[in-house]
Image: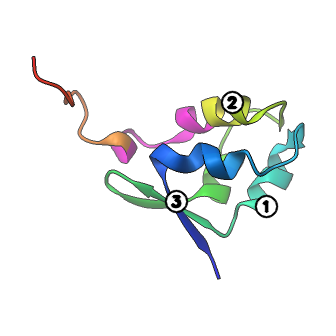
């Protein structure tokens, strides 16, 4: 059975990997994880496959690359602020 996590909690899932890790190994390991985004959901393994690095030295490295691979809609409406002006 697959796992589901919110984007804001993805670091908990990434911390479970053994680093350093190759991109393909991380993608295979996390292919069962559905990532809940602000506008829909995505497969975490597929998103990791779309990153540009071949390997990751830490969970922070992987999360940085993952943030670059996310669609713009992943975190909400473009150009919208969460706070008051």
**Which residue, given by chain and number where applicable, does mark 3 sit on?**
5
Helix, strand or loop at label 1? It is helix
Badge 2 is on which residue? 60
Pinpoint residue 40: horizontal percent, then vertical percent: 36, 60
In terms of sequence position, does the residue under pointer 2 or pointer 3 come before the other? 3
Secondary structure, mark 3, is strand
Element type at mark 2: helix
Between disc 1 and disc 3, whose residue precedes? 3
Seen at 50% across and 42% down, the residue is 70
Q: Main secondary structure of the magenta part?
A: helix
Which label lies toward us, 1 or 2? 2
Q: Position of residue 47 (x, y in %)?
A: 61, 50
Question: How far from the left and from the top, in percent, is residue 54?
Answer: 83, 36
User: In the displayed image of the protein, which residue is found farthest to the top?
Assistant: 85
The image quarter containing residue 63 is top right
Which residue appears at 34% of the width and 44% of the height? 73
Side (left or right) of 36 relative to 79: right
Of residue 69 and residue 76, the one placed in the foreground of this image is 76
Q: Which residues are magenta?
A: 66-74
Circle 1 residue: 29
> Where, by quadrant of the figure, is residue 71 drawn?
top left
């Amino acid at each position: 059975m697959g796992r589901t996590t919110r984007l804001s909690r993805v670091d908990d899932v990434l911390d479970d990997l053994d680093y350093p890790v190759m991109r393909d190994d991380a993608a295979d390991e996390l292919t069962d994880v559905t990532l809940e985004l602000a506008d829909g959901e995505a497969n975490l393994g597929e998103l990791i496959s779309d990153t540009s690095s071949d390997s990751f030295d830490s969970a922070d490295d992987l999360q940085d690359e993952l943030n670059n691979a996310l669609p713009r809609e992943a975190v909400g409406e473009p150009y919208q602020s969460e706070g008051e002006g």
